[in-house]
Image (spheres, rainbow, N blue to C red):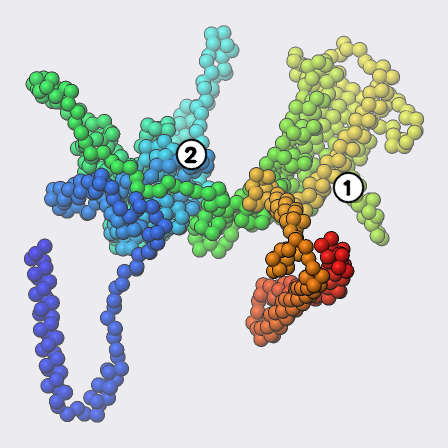
Amino acid sequence: MESTDLNEGDVVQNDSEDVIKEEDETEKEEGEDLTEDAEALKAELAKIIVHPPSYEPSPMEEFDQAEFSPSYKDNLPKENLVLQYAENFRRQMVQLYRDRKPLFLNPVNECGVEKFVCTTIRPTQLEFKELYNWDGAAEFVADYLNIEPLKPEYELPKRLISPATVLKRQKGNCFEYSTLLCSLLIGAGYDAYVISGYATKETCLADESRDICPLLKKKEEVKEEAKKKEMKKYNVKPPRDLRSKFELKQEAKREAEKQAEKEKLRKEEEERIAEMEKPPPDPYFGLRVHAWVLVLSGKREVPENFFIEPFTGLSHPMDSSNYLGIESVWNNVNYWVNMQDCSEGVKGLSFDLGDPTVWEYMFPNNDKPLLKVPDAEDDLNDMDDEEDDEEHEVEKYLDMPPSWVDALKLSHRDFQMRCPHGKKTKVYKRAKLEKFAHYLMKDGLISRLSVYEDRELTELIKVHEYYAHRSDKLTQRLTNHRTGQVCENFDPGRPRCLKEHQFKSSAPGPENERIMLFYHEARVDGLVKREETQSEMTEEYINRDDFLYYKYVEFGKRAKKFGPQETSTANKGRPINKMIQKFHRNRNKPANEDIAELIFHVAEDKIQITYHTEDVRIAASSREFLKPPNWDEKGAVLTFSPEMHQTFQVDPTQPANKQVELYEMLMELLKAEEKCRNEVRDSQNEVRSILDDRTKEEAASELDISVYDTERNEKAKKHRRELERQQLEEKMRKQEMDIDYLAPFLAKIGNPEKLTKQQAFSLKEECLADLKQRLIDKANLIQARFEKESQELEKKQAWYQQNQVSMGKEDEEEYLTYCKEAIFRIHILDLRLTRHKEQAPHKYMQLEQKLRNDERLSEFF
């Protein structure tokens, strides 16, 4: 290092000597006479002025030290001892490992006081249940704070702000992110640590533009292996496979070659795309300092170790390529230095912190179990005598002092805001995620995921919106901008138990393509699904008493009529051509009498019945009825003939039904058809009602607010204010009744027990004069306020006349709103002044009459 400094000094000295020589030569040349061209060149060069660059580091944010407790400004004796211990540890590491980067041990805090990093962690368990699990806590920290990148990115920060202050200011660097997250995780029972190391540029800057959005990643489906059926001894053997084994092998070989070719093309395409999307080379690769969180297995039933990236709140495996090396690890108990080779990043690193060969710990009271040395037992057997002497001695170690950080506090309102100012946007690979605080958006929107076709985010494919606290129970809406398909999901609690609604945005009205799913448990009819097109409608049911599980309706085209269309005809719906009902097996009835399928051919005046198949049969019985010609006439007598009925009996020995039985069966079928037709009309009306309700709900977008949320519940707030106002008025009324209106005037004359005539007249005149002055003052005050409002309105109108051309629509609306409110206030003041002028003489006369009737003055008047 010394030789390097010397060489640099020589270079600087040589450069200065060259500059001096050049200046001398220039002075000699200036003494010579210059030609006109040379003078012109000199004048042009004189115009060129350069300013040397100056690097000024960004000033550190200053804090008001009066806001912090004494633990922020001073160190306890034990903390000073720990700092000395850490300094000694640092010196030893520098002496033994000169090529290592400096360790992050004792940065200053907000007040400029050195603090050990382990004491900056404040384990805390907040009262919000969402922060009890690691994923909820990590997501909260990533959303709640704004990122401050390290400057410069290849050096450790000089200051580490406490987690309590980070929560208040809602921003921090990676070390402050990790310290806060580690505090929450340790408080929740996790074995968490802060890691100081190196990461990629994208990780350090939280650049997720090349990563797939977590909401778009498909969960890995675990495929269950099909259980092989056990072959029993007396089972029927399957038929022999007479196909050629050679041909099967050749076919399988050709199929494998096709699959291999497809897989090769797919990999080549993926490699090509990955090469195109590969980030440019980073000049600081492997040097960018970063901090993240390590969670070890064991506590809270964590099955395996994993990393947590504090900027994104996502977990990463132990061999993640985002992290390039580890310098040190610490929690609120101890500090460990990594002694392993990180030439391949974090791959293959051991995180057994109790192994002193790979992790050098600072404090001897390591809470991790130490590895046993194989020859230690032999050495211990040789020192039995020494152990007996020291059996009762207790070795004292320096333990970690308590955290100097104030208790972490977070209000319910701040927790619900989640993001700074309630909004946060993240850009991913061909996607953009927007997050909003609860109750911030009028429609209850809490997040919006937009998926694009290109990386420039210009060609929109679909939008996935998430809602909360809506009175219509809407939770999600997926809009596909290519197909125009819209899918809405609802929570239980809607009037008609709608669960999911799929439709096209170009045709949202009735009698169009749509799919509706329902919460069948909450419906009386057990409806699960309703699928509708322009010509068909299908419904599916579950757990009905009549065993109905399927209904299909085929509609015809409306007859075109000339002239104005009647409203009654428009509301009747589409004409019905055919209706189909399917039923499950009813074991309480014989199969030949249990209907499996019932088809009403409305357009053909025909009814078909198919019964369930008996267990010992392979075919099912069926019937077909032709409806009487006058079946739709009310009060008409229906006739029945044998030609109107056809049947197929599987069992020929079964007796045929009598004509009376067939007639009664036909009457029941006609009633069933009428009932089915009414149900179809009810279904159509229900669809219209749901669509009307959805239109009104989208226009209103009302949110449900809990009665316990006194800050947002306006009704409860108004009621509470009204009660407070009534109590205050009642209190003032009692005070006015207790006050003697003559007390100030009697005090001036010494509060005599009995008034003289002269005193009575003087008292009367003073009371009336005081009231008169008060009435005049009140009138002047109202007039002053009236003039002030008028002047402000005139100024606003003059400003509008000047800036009318360049004003936007929002500014113009704001101006009109202000004018309406100002005119309203001026009108109120005018009315108050007029009313005051009218009431003032009456008040004066009332006081005069009150003085005459007062028992203390009445004898003199």
Residue 160 appears left or right of 807 = left
**Dot 1, crowdedness within 10 Å: few (<14), some or many (≥20)?**
some
Of 554 and 25, nearer the camera is 25
The answer to which image quadrant residue 362 occupies is top left
Q: Is residue 300 above or below residue 99?
A: above
Q: Quarter of the image containing the C terminus?
A: bottom right
Disc 2 marks a residue whose amino acid type is Tyr
Of 23 and 771, nearer the camera is 771
Q: Can residue 345 be seen in the rendering of this structure?
A: no
**Dot 2, crowdedness within 10 Å: few (<14), some or many (≥20)?**
some
Which residue in the structure is indicated by mark 1? Answer: 573
Residue 185, image x, y percentages: 36, 36
The answer to which image quadrant residue 39 occupies is bottom left
Of 118 and 854, nearer the camera is 854
Disc 1 marks a residue whose amino acid type is Gly
Residue 425 appears left or right of 781 = left
User: Which is nearer the N-term, disc 2 or disc 1?
Assistant: 2
Which residue in the structure is indicated by mark 2? Answer: 132
Residue 858, image x, y percentages: 75, 56
Residue 764 appears left or right of 302 = right
The answer to which image quadrant residue 220 occupies is top left
Q: CA distance from mark 2 to mark 1?
A: 55 Å
SS class, disc 1: loop
Residue 272, image x, y percentages: 36, 49
Q: Is residue 406 above or below residue 427?
A: above
Residue 854, image x, y percentages: 73, 54
Pointers 2 and 1 in contact (C-beta within 8 Å): no
Q: Nearer the viewer, mark 2 or mark 1?
A: 2
